[in-house]
Image: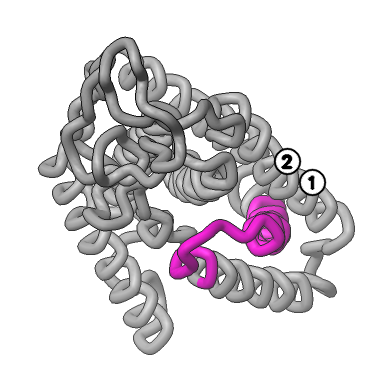
Amino acid sequence: MRSSNPVFSRRGFSRDSGYAGFNAQQPQAGGPAVGNNPYAQGTGNPYATNPYAPADTRTGAGPQAPARADVMTIDDVVSRTAMTLGTVVITAVLSWVLLPVDEANIGKSYGIAIGAALVALVLSLVQAFKRKPVPAVILAYAAFEGVFLGVISNVVSTYISPGVVVQAVLGTMCVFAGVLFAYKMRWIRVTRRFYGFVMAAAMGFLLLMVANLLFSAFGGGDGLGFRSGGLGILFGVIGIILGACFLALDFKQVEDGVTYGAPREESWLAAFGLTLTLVWIYLEMLRLLSILQGND
């Protein structure tokens, strides 16, 4: 079963360092922030000072930047994420209803689903390599990803594990809530080391999944056995844990964007990353629960 790859969405708000401001100190009142984040105060922040503003005659301080109204907020991230996830859900429901998976039509529905998945992958890569978010590309990705998820979910629910889709959705919501709570309580600390470990683990995981797919395609059966039995359960759990780690990276990305006054348009990038990660977790949860129920 294909996992949408959130690795390609890892582009933090510190574009010069690529680590989303990890380990950067928070801005102090009246002083510059430390780190390479272009939205932090100091010489690296294009919004920190206004060369045309008069100096403060009372303190002798240099010119200060006027307050900006177009900065990213939590509300912006929530609304954009609701739009992208809503698009995924709507197209998934429509594809579930309009693309039947009975024996006479399953081949056609599978073909449409695979085509939609490939288009979604291309669109996600296009956005990942652009310097600025393109809302139309992000929403188009969400729509095509929803078509893929709708057909796959319908097939799994019809032929493998009835009722598993609801369980996978609830499981995904629980993982999201759990990671958010742990992040807010500072039980999870996102550092450069954490980032590097997660990225290395994710790349290894993906390479194993690709190898399993190739062995399955050319050798038949379940390839290396990563989609069934004990190995399937193990890798399903690992996939969900990796998704949880990516959620922590996403939360750090949002936190840095709000803290350092990123432009409002960057909220689309945050929504894009969260959507990719939640799709990853849902697919891994669906696969794991299917294996567990199949072993009953």
Numbered range of the magenta stretch = 126-154
Left or right: 215 in relation to 31: right
| Helix, strand or loop status at disc 2 | helix
Q: Quadrant of residue 215?
A: bottom left
Q: Is residue 62 above or below residue 275?
A: above
Q: Position of residue 28 (x, y in %)?
A: 24, 18
The image's colouring method is one colour
Horizontal relation, residue 100 to residue 139: left or right: right
Residue at the bottom extreme, as displayed: 218
The answer to whether residue 87 shows anywhere in this view is yes
From the image, give the main secondary structure of the stretch colored magenta. Answer: helix
Residue 148 belongs to magenta span = yes
Q: Is residue 143 above or below residue 230?
A: below
Between marks 2 and 1 in the image, the one whose residue lies nearer the viewer = 2
- Read off the residue under disc 2: 86
Rendered residue at 15%/48% (across/down):
197
Q: Residue at x 32, y 11 (%)?
A: 58
- The amino acid at mark 1 is Ile
User: Is 164 colored magenta in this rendering?
Assistant: no
Farthest residue to the left: give it: 193
Q: Residues within 10 Å of mark 2 (few under 14, many from 20)?
A: some
Could you tell me how many numbered marks the image carries?
Answer: 2
Q: Residue at x 69, y 49 (%)?
A: 88
Mark 2–mark 1 CB contact (< 8 Å) = yes
Q: Which mark is residue 90?
A: 1
Occupied quadrant, residue 250: top left
| Quarter of the figure with the C terminus | top left
- The amino acid marked with disc number 2 is Gly
Quadrant housing residue 209: bottom left
Of 238 and 121, which appears nearest the observer?
A: 121
